[in-house]
Image (cartoon, helix red, strand yellow):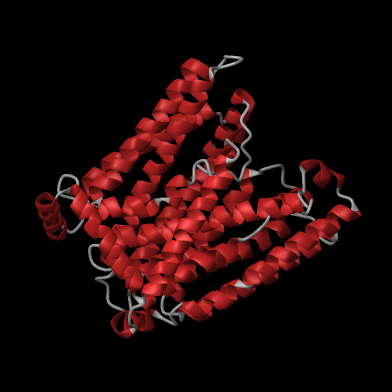
Amino acid sequence: MRAAYRPLLISTMNDHFQRNYDPGTALLDWGDMLSVFLGLFSDCVPIYGTRRKAYVALGWILSALSYGSVYAIHLREIRGVKEPDAMFGRLLEAWSIIGGFALQLSWVAALALIVGFGQREALSERGGLATLFLILWQAGALTAHFTAAEFQSKLTLLNTSAALALTSLVALPFVLCFLYEDEQESAATLISTKRAGVLPALRTGVIQLWEVCQEKVTYRVLLFLLVYGVLLNACDPTVDKALARWSGFGDADPWVLVIMSGVGVVALIHAKWRLLSTAWRQLAFVGTGIVVVAAVVRATVVTTDTIRAKWFFSLFTGLMMWPKTWILLFTVLTTTEIAHVGCEGVTVGLVLSGQGLGTSGINAVARWISDSTNTRITPSLIEEDSHNIRARVLFVAAAYAAVNFFAAVDVLWLPRSKLEAQQLRAFGGYSRKGAALIAILFVALLALAIITNFHVV
């Protein structure tokens, strides 16, 4: 969706409906940022006796309906029309956002199911099932990115929305026929919900989430995943575009995403074979160092015109992507250790919400800095390729590499290993201040996301 549908939707909204969306807008990211509520419903409100399977299926059903509606609206009211009614633009936005929520619902429910199964693994093997799931997911992303790159010239919002709707329908029978979950646990939750009602069940889920957040190990892990992920992923997209352009890639070249997805698959396979028993802190420190060094070397070599070739840009972009993939691994492994039985969905959702809100916040800050300091790198400046522009790109890249480096400070929040995480959960104690800090951060980042993204509407 990010490789094909998102840019096509933004282009359609800007060209046909005079909107002012930029590529970094969070139009389709609200599902990520509000994942905690999706996880809460998955935990507390079973459907047809299941908490995970039903929500995974529901997500695919809503996805098919949403993107099918986008296809129908575009086919009947936008294609071939010079000035379509603004109402249909709003409908495109609405159905696209619903589709994003639907896919995120399936993702949250699936991760919650994997976390629940992962808690039953032996300590030495814990994380193996989750890593296998992530490998399959990343392989699917690689396939989607490769398809989008191969047929880029033929992609339109019309056929892309049709492909998403069709893919959702194809996935549905596999979910219904082959996905299983703990029937005994689901039955107990269903009986509890029927006795208490939906609203009291949701209220109980919120109380349980508050209790989980008070555990010191929980807020330490959540703060690590939020701050470490945001700082390590901090970058200026225009710098990446400039370096890619000077290295021989076209504007918004989808093959860059193919390279990153391919590296992600290899990194996860390597992690499953070699890294599951590695100390978490050591892995996080090494990852930070790799990202910082690779970013500085890539920017320095390309801006000084020492080597400008696709192979060099691809190599160092892959080196940067390798440890960034470990963030996804940390997300599942740490959540497996801190989640309480029956609270897997809301715990996973809280982590994903924090990461989504953090990414939106850092993007907003990056745009504000580039605008206020007049350092935005436009396509015309990239084509100019003057000495001053090269120096500006190198300066901005070095500044963001310094931000990436500060991610190492946050590693101290992370437990050293799976064993220490379990010990902290058992004997680490509680802190209401830690839970309050998480709540304040969530509200502040959500407010920032609303202000910055509704400003362009």
Image coordinates of residue 316 in percent, x first then y, are 68, 63
Q: Is residue 372 left or right of residue 439?
A: right
Q: Is residue 212 left or right of residue 193?
A: right
Dividing the image into 4 quarters, which one contains the C terminus?
top right
Residue at the image point whose x is 41% and y is 81% from the top: 417
Residue at the image point whose x is 42% and y is 54% from the top: 137
Query: Image quadrant of residue 8?
Result: top right
Residue 180 can be seen, yes or no: no
> How many numbered badges does the structure rendering display?
0
Name the one closer to the observer, 385 or 230: 230
Point out the residue furthest to the right here.
Answer: 387
Residue 18 lies, with reference to residue 51, above or below; the image says above
Image coordinates of residue 369 in percent, x first then y, are 71, 55
Image coordinates of residue 173 in percent, x first then y, are 26, 40
Residue 391 lies, with reference to residue 62, above or below; the image says below
Residue at the image point whose x is 50% and y is 57% from the top: 444
Image coordinates of residue 7 in percent, x first then y, are 58, 37
Q: Is residue 76 left or right of residue 58?
A: right
Residue 364 can be seen, yes or no: yes
Name the one closer to the observer, 280 or 88: 88
Residue at the image point whose x is 52% and y is 59% from the top: 264
